[in-house]
Amino acid sequence: MIVKTRKYKISSGLYIKLGIQNILRMQWWIFPLLALFMSSIFFIKTIWLLLVGIIGFICYLIFWVIQFYGLTKLENSRPMFERVAYEINNQHLLVQINTKQAMPISWVDIQKAYKKKGYFLLVLSKVQFFYLPFKIFHGDNEIKFFTTVLQRKGLLR
């Protein structure tokens, strides 16, 4: 079975928001490290450790926001932010800009997939991912088929 979706364009604001969420999910170890650093205030009685921890975390978030914002402005990543349609089958995910321009993405290239409330998120790397909202599918059967394909490939758990 081949699933052909409607065309969809992701906005740069949504891409940045999902990118930050994905980075925080992938680099979860930042939070225990930050808590450990900030809990040292109980041993060394100074407010500076707390302030350095908060400022360091804010700088970390700003760094990643700048990375994602810059990615949306690069000429090389422009195809990611055009209206594209997807063709999904067992062999690959085909990203189509139009009928003549398409890029197949093997299931091996996808690191992980997430099924959230209302969308799929297919992660290729820290900063590259595909956002597939449920509204681009033509029905519940296509969503179920795509979920089954992701589970068979070991991407969705």
Image (cartoon, grey):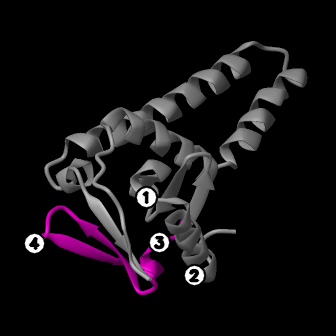
- Farthest bottom residue in view: 91
Look at mark 2 in the image and give the residue it sits on.
Answer: 153
Closest to the camera, between mark 4 and mark 1, is: 1
Q: Is residue 78 toward the left or the right of residue 30 in the image?
A: left
* Amino acid marked by disc 1: Phe
Residue drawn at (50%, 29%), measured in percent from left and top?
A: 59
Q: Give the spatial CA distance, label 4 vs label 1.
A: 22 Å
* Amino acid marked by disc 2: Lys
Q: Give the spatial CA distance, label 4 vs label 3.
A: 24 Å
Of residues 105 and 91, the one nearer the viewer is: 91
Report crowding for label 1: few under 14, some 14 to 19, many 20 or more residues within 10 A (C-alpha). some
Whichever of labels 4 and 2 marks the residue nearer the N terminus, that label is 4
Look at mark 4 in the image and give the residue it sits on.
Answer: 100
Closest to the camera, between mark 2 and mark 1, is: 1
- Farthest left residue in view: 100
Asked whether the beta carbons under mark 3 and mark 2 sit within 8 Å of each other, the answer is: yes
Residue 77 image point, x, y percent = 22, 53
Rendered view: 32 above or below 130: above
Q: Which mark is residue 110?
A: 3
Rendered view: 154 above or below 71: below
* Amino acid marked by disc 4: Lys
* Amino acid marked by disc 3: Ile
Whichever of labels 3 and 2 marks the residue nearer the N terminus, that label is 3
Does the magenta-highlighted stretch encompass residue 96? yes
Whichever of labels 1 and 3 marks the residue nearer the N terminus, that label is 3
Residue 6 image point, x, y percent = 32, 56
| Residue 17 in view in this figure | yes
Of residues 132 and 155, the one nearer the viewer is: 132
Rendered view: 113 above or below 34: below
